[in-house]
Image: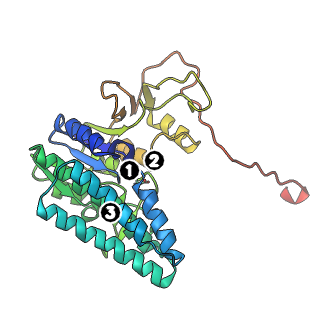
Amino acid sequence: MKILKFGGSSLKTAKRIEHVVQLISSQHPCGVVVSAFGGITNQILQLISHAELGADFNINLQLFFEKHRKIINDLNLKRELMLDTIKKIENELFFTLKKIASKKKCTPQLKDLGLSVGERLSAIIITEACIQKEINTTYLDARKVILTDDNFGNAFVHYKRSFNSIRNNWEDKSKTRIITGFIGATDSGETTTFGRSGSDYTASIFGAALNVKEIEIWTDVNGILSADPNIVSETRTISHITYDEAMELAHAGAKIIFPPTIIPALYKSIPIRIKNTFEPENPGTTISQERAKNDYFAVGISSLYNVSLIRFQGAGML
Ligand code: ASP
């Protein structure tokens, strides 16, 4: 079995979601981690800022709901049970924003709860789209199985306990599960998040817990490029890279994957494959323990922007 992860850019419109459902169907049964639909997390952050300032957030909130409703309509999803669940989650966001507005302050707890709405809505809608295509699918809210500390916004995962819960949840292996990326929960059930782009990390946690054959991160480029294409015109896809190399590039500014993603996969030596949703036949990049030697002098070049170098000097520094 594999774990697949689809990011927001692969889930921006009903058409893209239909394409993703086809990719899921070709790998069924599998675990599928999803991000919020493209642009949605930024929109929630904006709603939170408006609420904090005491500004009227209602119009923008309706637009936010509309975006999801349009996708639901375009996909022709009509089941009452799903529509009720969507309504409940929408209400949860409304009351969270109301709380923030009344205090004119957003606590880290409320922020994580608000942000979780993006992934929950997307996972429910995609589950329904898969069921409609007769793929034996079920929805999994990762807060049920990923346990974290209470470092809201950048939560630390309790691996052992989370791995056990994931395995218990996966007894029925015949179903595909659509899993909310980016979120977990504390012992007392409070919602936490892992930081921006954290859904990659969710995929790796599930992959390691279930000892899968491969973790596939589906994005909108053909894997990891050898340099930033905005600067270097002749970039190429790096076909194979080791965990160490990927970590080093990621820490030095390359937008590869969310850096903690490497940890669970490395621990179980599970290869991570980065693939392009819009070019599925392209092999993309494989990150693994070892790689064959190649002819290139450097594996890749990362670049950091807007960095200031500050030099302290003087006898006191001795
Ligand atoms: N939706 C979250 C974000 O935009 C997490 C993710 O996509 O991985 O950062």
Provide residue 313's location: percent of width, then percent of height: 87, 53
* Camera-side mark, 3 or 2: 3
* Camera-side mark, 3 or 1: 3
Provide residue 90's location: percent of width, then percent of height: 30, 68
Q: Is residue 30 above or below residue 138?
A: above
Q: Where is residue 158, by image quadrant?
A: bottom left
* Near-viewer residue (112 or 82): 82
State which tag comes first along the sequence, 3 or 2.
3
The answer to whether the residue labelled 2 contacts the one labelled 1, judged by CB atoms less than 8 Å apart, is yes
Q: Is residue 60 left or right of residue 117?
A: right
Does the beta carbon of the residue at mark 2 sit less than 8 Å from ligand 1? yes
* Near-viewer residue (3 or 41): 41
Residue at 22%, 60% in the rendered image: 165
Query: Dot 1: within a 10 Å radius of its alpha carbon, few (fewer than 14), some, or many (20 or more) residues?
Result: many
Q: Is residue 94 left or right of residue 310?
A: left
Question: Label 2's element?
Answer: loop
Q: Is residue 168 above or below residue 255?
A: below
Cα distance in 3D space between marks 2 and 1: 7 Å
Q: Which mark is residue 282?
A: none
Question: Label 3's element?
Answer: helix
What is the three-letter code of the residue carrying label 1?
Tyr
Q: Is residue 71 above or below residue 271?
A: below
Provide residue 312's location: percent of width, then percent of height: 83, 54
Question: Label 1's element?
Answer: helix
Inspect this view and state whether residue 149 appears: no
Find disc 3 in the rendering and name its residue.
65
State which tag comes first along the sequence, 3 or 1.
3
Find disc 1 in the rendering and name its residue.
201
Query: Dot 3: within a 10 Å radius of its alpha carbon, few (fewer than 14), some, or many (20 or more) residues?
Result: some
Residue at 70%, 47% in the rendered image: 307
Query: Dot 2: within a 10 Å radius of its alpha carbon, few (fewer than 14), some, or many (20 or more) residues?
Result: some
Find disc 2 in the rendering and name its residue.
258
